Image (cartoon, helix red, strand yellow):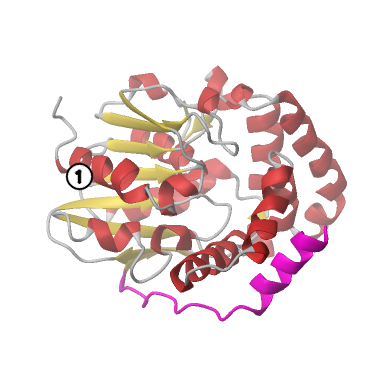
Amino acid sequence: MAAALAGLRAYQTATRPERPRAMPIIASAGRATLADYGGIGRPVIVIPSLINSPDVLDLLPDHSLMRWLATQGLRPLLVDWGSPTPDERDLDLADHIERLLLPLIETVGSDAALVGYCLGGTMAVAAAAIRPPAGLALIAAPWHFSGFPEDARRGLAALWEQARPYTEAMGMLPLEVLQSGFWRLDPARTVGKFVAFGARDQAADDIRRFVALEDWANDGAALTAAAGRELVLDFFGQDRPGRGTWRVAGRAVDPSALACPTLDIVSTSDRIVPAASAANIGRRLTLAQGHVGMMVGSRARTQLWEPLARWLSDPTAR
């Protein structure tokens, strides 16, 4: 514990790295916005999770999936869900897709591809079912929520019951409630990363990445009460997506019926979104990296970014 607390102090007192410069906003729908990262080629709309900010996709000026994709003959566009307000308490996940995401997609055109990360991938499947894109790439995106460990699902349900009174009073589910549930999926790693950070001398670039990543992991907007309730009770509790009973825009969402090429990127060592929860559609790319490491780790470019860019350049290629 002493070593972990020492590492935590080192993180808290570290100099904060420079954030990447903000990119132009080209469209908005309610509180959600679409940022243009430049580049010439096929538009690629990247959809982050509702949990945490989209910053992990644009972590540092020299370590950013979005900025790198712009150099690969593509035009990446990043969705930012914004921060909900209490008067949006009844906005569930389907509403986020229908009222915020689909209007943003409509501004880009039919030749755009979608890339969804984590819960953003789950939501991207529903968007693609309503408005087929040029291609859909899923990165660590859960669909069969029964594939999560049973104790993790029970733990989230218990956390929801504890948080329900003040969630209903505020109209929002604080990020910390879900974060504590995800920490329970791999508690040893949660402690171990700070032990390691405080126990050894590290290169300046390693420190910069660690601090930027932890700042992202511990920041993010709350969920609307309806979205939090649906995520915990309907998704993790009843596995409505996996059972084919999740409805968006009046229709049940079936990933196997999508009218577009798909790429499903999963990891056998992902403790946050286990491989057993994947949609298992289209082409599959299997990795052996952590949920966040696959996006920003030292091997992220060769293992994920490069094959993703090749597929996006021609989703119909075999």
- Please state which of residues 185 and 237 is positioned toward the viewer in this rendering: 185
Image location of residue 204, percent across then percent down: 47, 73
| Quadrant position of residue 263 | top left
Q: Amino acid at mark 1?
A: Ser
Q: Quadrant of the N terminus?
A: bottom right
Label 1 sits on residue = 110
The reply, left or right, for residue 54 in relation to residue 220 is left
Q: Is residue 125 magenta?
A: no
Which residue is pictured at 41% across the width and 22% down the height? 280
**Above or below, comparing residue 233 to residue 276 in the picture:** below
Which residue is pictured at 33% across the width and 43% down the height? 304
**Above or below, comparing residue 27 to residue 283 in the picture:** below
Which residue is pictured at 17% across the width and 54% down the height? 72
- Please state which of residues 303 and 24 is positioned toward the viewer in this rendering: 303
Q: Which residues are magenta?
A: 1-25
| Label 1 neighbour load within 10 Å: few <14, some 14-19, many 20+ | few
**Above or below, comparing residue 25 to residue 160 in the picture:** below
Q: Is residue 13 magenta?
A: yes
Task: Work out whether residue 174 can be spotted.
Answer: no
Image location of residue 255, percent across then percent down: 40, 24
The reply, left or right, for residue 163 in relation to residue 37 is right
Q: SS of the residue at dot 1? A: loop
Task: Work out whether residue 8 can be spotted.
Answer: yes
**Above or below, comparing residue 207 to residue 307 in the picture:** below
